[in-house]
C-alpha cells in the first residue's frame, strides 16, 4: 500500500488519505453565492476518493472580490455552504475553504469602490486606479480574516487555507514589486511581513483547537524584481512560527507572471471568446501573448524548489504543481511532503484518486492546454474534453497548443 493512501493530520483534522483538491478557482458561484453546480462538483471529487476538497478563493469582504462568480464568505451563505460540507462529509472526505483578499486585482464595479492594495498605483489588468491601504484599515482587514475563519466553522468546514501567494493582497505586501510603502509596513522584508503576521494572528485565534489552518505561499514570485527563494523561505519560516498547521508551496504572480503558477500556454482566443466587454476582448487579443507569456509545463514543475523548503521547515508541507499520475503523487509523498494537491487532474477526472488507488500506474488524460483556466475568468471552469460543440476557432487553438506541447 502506498503511503499516499494512509491517513494524516492537518492540525487537529484527520484526512483519510494524503490527497487534497487544490483551491483552483471554480468560477461556479453566482452573485458571490454558492450554486448547485459548485456543490455537485465538490461532491463528485469527494465521492472520487480525495482526502479533502477545497472551495476556492472566498473573499473575506466586499473589497476582496475579483469576480461575481467568486464566493463572498459571509453569514448569509452559511446554510448553502452547509449543504456542500455536509455532502462532502457524507462521502468520507474533509472540507476546506480558501480565504483571501484580491487586493488590486479587481474593478470598482465588483469591489464596491476603488480597488485597494499595499501601495497606490494603476492595475493594467482591470484597468483601474488602485488606492494604497491606510494603516487603520489593515487592522480591520486582519480581523476580517479571523471572522472568515469563524464563518467557515459555522458552515461546517474542517480546514481553512489562507491565500498569501500569487500576487493577491498578503502577497502584495510581501513582494517588493507591489509594496512601495514608506511606513512600518514597507521597506525591508521584516516590515513587509507585518500585515501577514496581523492576519495570521487573527486566523489562529479564530481557529482555536478544532480547525486546521493551511497557508498558500510563494516559493518565488516568478519574475525579476519579485520575491526570490531566499526571502520566500524567510516568509515560510515565519508562517511556521505563527502556528500554521501546513503550508502549500506555490509560486507566481497573477498580475505579472500568471503562467508561472499553472505553466503552459494561455489559449488567448478561448479566454477572450467568453468575455462580455468588447474593448477588453479585442484588447487582450491584440496584446495577450505579451501580457501572459508562456511558461513551459513539465510534470512536478515545483518539485526542485519545494525540496529546498522541505529541508528548511518542520511543519507538514503540501506539494502542488504538475501532479498528473499515481507515479507523481507517490514521488511527492516519498520525497517528504505530507500531502499532495491537484487541480486540473481533478477537473479532468473527479474520480482521479480512486483511479490511482485501483491502478498503480494511472495517469489522468489532462493535456494541459489550459482551456479550463482560459474560460474561468468569465464562466465556470470546465475541461474541454467534457464539452460538446466548441467553436471551430477554439478547437483549432487547442489543437495548436497540443501540437506545441508535443501531445499530437
Image (cartoon, rainbow, N blue to C red):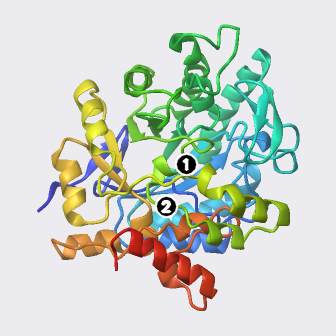
Q: Looking at the picture, how far across and down is residue 255, in whole percent?
A: 63, 42
Q: Residue at 49% of width from left, 61% of height from top?
A: 265
User: Which of disc 1 and disc 2 is earlier in sequence?
Assistant: 1
Residue at the far left in the pictured view: 1
- Asked whether residue 102 appears in the rendered view, the answer is yes
- Vertically, is 370 above or below 243? below
What's the CA distance linking mark 2 and mark 1?
A: 10 Å
Decide which of 134, 232 is in the foreground and name it. Answer: 232
Question: In the image shown, does 140 or 330 lie closer to the viewer?
Answer: 330
Pair 2/1: label in front: 2
Which residue is denoted by mark 1 in the rendering?
Answer: 258
Q: Position of residue 320 (x, y in %)?
A: 37, 50
Secondary structure type for disc 2:
loop
Identity of the residue drawn at 29% across and 53% down:
300
- Whether label 2 touches label 1, CB < 8 Å: no
Q: Quadrant of residue 197?
A: top right
Q: Where's the N terminus, which quadrant?
A: bottom left
* Secondary-structure class at tag 1: helix
The residue located at (17%, 72%) in the rendering is: 361
For disc 2, the marked residue is 265
Q: Is residue 214 left or right of residue 133?
A: left
Is residue 367 visible from the viewing direction of this image?
no
Packing grade of label 2 (10 A; few <14, some 14-19, many >=20) is: many
Amino acid at each position: 500500500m502506498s503511503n499516499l493512501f494512509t491517513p494524516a493530520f492537518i492540525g487537529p483534522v484527520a484526512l483519510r488519505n494524503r490527497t487534497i483538491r487544490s483551491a483552483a478557482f471554480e468560477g461556479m458561484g453566482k452573485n458571490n453565492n454558492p450554486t448547485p453546480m459548485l456543490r455537485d462538483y465538490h461532491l463528485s471529487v469527494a465521492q472520487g476518493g480525495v482526502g479533502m476538497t477545497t472551495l476556492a478563493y472566498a473573499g473575506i469582504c466586499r473589497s476582496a472580490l475579483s469576480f461575481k462568480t467568486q464566493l463572498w464568505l459571509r453569514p448569509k451563505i452559511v446554510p448553502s455552504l452547509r449543504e456542500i460540507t455536509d455532502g462532502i462529509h457524507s462521502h468520507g472526505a474533509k472540507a476546506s475553504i480558501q480565504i483571501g483578499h484580491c487586493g488590486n486585482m479587481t474593478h470598482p464595479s465588483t469591489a464596491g469602490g476603488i480597488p485597494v492594495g499595499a501601495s497606490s498605483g494603476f492595475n493594467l489588468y482591470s484597468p483601474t486606479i488602485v488606492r494604497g491601504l491606510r494603516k487603520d484599515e489593515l487592522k480591520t482587514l486582519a480581523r476580517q480574516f479571523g471572522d472568515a475563519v469563524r464563518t467557515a466553522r459555522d458552515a461546517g468546514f474542517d480546514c481553512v487555507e489562507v491565500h498569501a501567494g500569487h500576487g493577491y493582497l498578503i502577497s502584495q505586501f510581501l513582494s517588493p514589486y507591489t509594496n512601495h510603502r514608506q511606513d512600518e509596513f514597507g521597506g525591508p522584508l521584516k516590515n513587509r511581513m507585518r500585515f501577514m503576521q496581523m492576519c495570521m494572528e487573527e486566523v489562529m485565534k479564530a481557529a482555536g483547537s478544532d480547525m486546521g489552518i493551511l497557508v498558500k505561499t510563494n516559493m518565488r514570485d516568478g519574475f525579476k524584481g519579485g520575491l526570490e527563494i531566499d526571502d520566500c523561505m524567510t516568509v515560510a519560516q515565519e508562517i511556521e512560527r505563527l502556528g500554521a498547521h501546513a503550508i502549500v508551496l506555490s509560486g507566481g504572480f497573477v498580475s505579472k507572471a500568471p503562467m508561472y503558477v499553472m505553466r503552459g500556454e494561455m489559449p488567448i482566443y478561448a479566454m477572450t471568446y467568453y468575455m462580455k466587454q468588447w474593448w477588453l476582448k479585442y484588447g487582450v487579443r491584440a496584446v495577450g501573448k505579451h501580457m501572459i507569456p508562456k511558461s513551459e509545463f513539465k510534470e512536478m514543475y515545483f518539485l526542485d524548489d519545494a525540496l529546498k523548503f522541505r529541508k528548511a521547515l518542520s511543519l507538514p508541507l503540501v506539494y502542488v504543481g504538475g501532479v498528473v499520475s499515481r507515479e507523481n503523487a507517490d514521488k511527492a509523498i516519498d520525497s517528504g511532503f505530507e500531502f499532495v494537491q491537484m487541480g486540473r487532474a481533478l477537473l479532468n477526472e473527479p474520480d482521479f484518486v480512486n483511479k490511482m488507488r485501483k491502478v498503480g500506474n494511472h495517469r489522468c488524460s489532462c493535456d494541459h492546454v489550459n482551456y479550463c483556466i482560459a474560460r474561468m475568468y468569465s464562466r465556470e471552469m470546465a475541461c474541454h474534453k467534457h464539452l460538446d460543440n466548441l467553436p471551430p476557432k477554439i478547437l483549432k487553438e487547442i489543437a495548436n497548443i497540443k501540437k506545441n506541447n508535443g501531445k499530437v
